Amino acid sequence: MLHETASIATPAGELEGTLDLPTGAKGVVLFAHGSGSSRFSPRNNFVAGVLRAAGIGTLLVDLLTPAEDQVYRTRFNISLLAERLGLAADWLAACVAARGLPLGLFGASTGAAAALQFAAERKDVAAVVSRGGRPDLTGQVALARVAAPTLFIVGGRDEGVIELNESAFHNLHCKKRIDIVPGATHLFEEAGALEEVARLARDWFSQHLS
């Protein structure tokens, strides 16, 4: 297992991240955290561990500097978040150990919108997974341009977000699927809910990063 600290330059300062690559990794998944979260998100880190156990590398990175994260509206600047994902993807492309590996995106909440916007702009994305995402913030035009196979995972008790996901789902023209986790709320804190998210994401990436 390769473990490397990422330092990604932006006009606003350095973004920190962590790259973990299992030996013989079949691909690497870049995580986009939600509003108010970071690369230390316990839910994203749990999913990342399941992916690594399946032979898939992970890059968890902060999308905002500490100063930017203090500004509420910046947390919802989807274009900025997508731009930062692009910088992280460029860092990955320049990393010798990860070079040439298929790229997946895992986005949570607002991070899912950024991941989809990024996927609409860059055709080197092999697969996308949204967990409790806000794909409606991506915009209809961008959603229609996403070519990568895309999976939406939504909690069965995440009222309002289910409808937003279903509406955005209809604007996707790529290979797509939406899975509802019964009894789960927005953060998938219920017993077994996050494990189900990780299983669904692992299977989707295992299928589409090959």
Image (spheres, grey):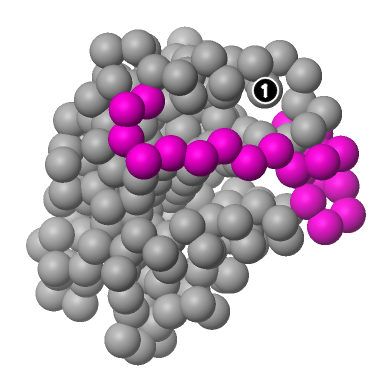
* 182 displayed left or right of 203: right
Closer to us: 124 or 91: 124
Q: Is residue 178 magenta?
A: yes
> Which residue is at a point 57% across and 37% down the rendered structure image?
178
Can see residue 160?
A: yes
> Which residue is at a point 31% across and 86% down the rendered structure image?
24
Quadrant where the N terminus sits is: bottom left
> Which residue is at a point 42% across and 26% down the rendered structure image?
113
Range of the magenta residues?
Answer: 172-193
SS at circle 1 = helix
- In the rendered image, residue 19, in percent from the top left (x then y), is placed at 36, 67
Residue designated by label 1: 162
Q: Please tell me whether residue 134 is drawn above or below residue 188 in the rendered image.
A: above
Residue 185 found in image quarter? top right
Amino acid at circle 1? Ile
Residue 4 found in image quarter? bottom left
* 3 displayed left or right of 98: right
